[in-house]
Image (cartoon, helix red, strand yellow):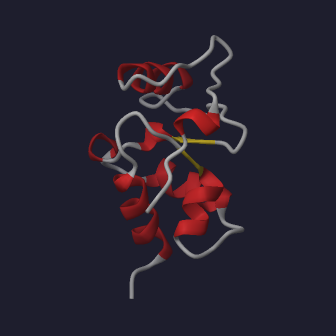
Amino acid sequence: MRSFKEKVILAVGQIPKGRVASYGQIAAICGNIRAARQVGAILKSVQDLGSLPWWRVLNSQGNISIKGNFSATKSLQKILLEEEGVEVTANFSIEMEKYRWKKK
């Protein structure tokens, strides 16, 4: 059986280019609807962020809410989303329902 962390990494890896998901949505997909903050903590702890599309995960209101560190910032997340065709406002928000990933 996979751990919650492994499930989160797999789910985030499935979000297609140009689509986004909320932390809560990923938590629900992984079987724990109350673990949105844990999803954020897991993404922050991943050492090899280059292979995981962490920038496609936002808060439920469609805001970039990353606290950031030296390598992952709000500005970087905005740039990465815009490179995929996601429109991000100057206030670091997007129209969630327009870009939300609907897992099949």
Residue at the image position 39 percent from the left and 81 percent from the top: 2
Q: Which sits in the foreground, 96 or 9? A: 96
Question: What percent of the width, then of the height, locates residue 10?
Answer: 36, 63
Residue 28, x across and y down, in percent: 61, 67
In the image, 73: left or right of 89? Answer: left
Residue in the picture at 36% in, 44% down: 16
Picture coordinates of residue 45, whole percent (x, y) = 46, 53
Q: Is residue 27 left or right of residue 33?
A: left
Specify whether 102 is left or right of 12: right
In the rendered image, is residue 62 in sight?
yes
Horizontal and vertical percent for residue 3?
A: 44, 78
Is 2 situated left or right of 63 in this image? left
Q: Is residue 66 visible?
A: no
Of 47 and 93, which appears nearest the observer? 93
The quadrant in which residue 95 appears is top right
Q: Give above or below for 3 relative to 34.
A: below
Q: Quadrant of the N terminus?
A: bottom left
Give the farthest residue toward the bottom.
Answer: 1
Residue closer to the observer: 67 or 21: 21
Quarter of the rendering occupied by the C terminus: bottom left
Residue placed at 46% from the left, 63% from the top?
Answer: 8
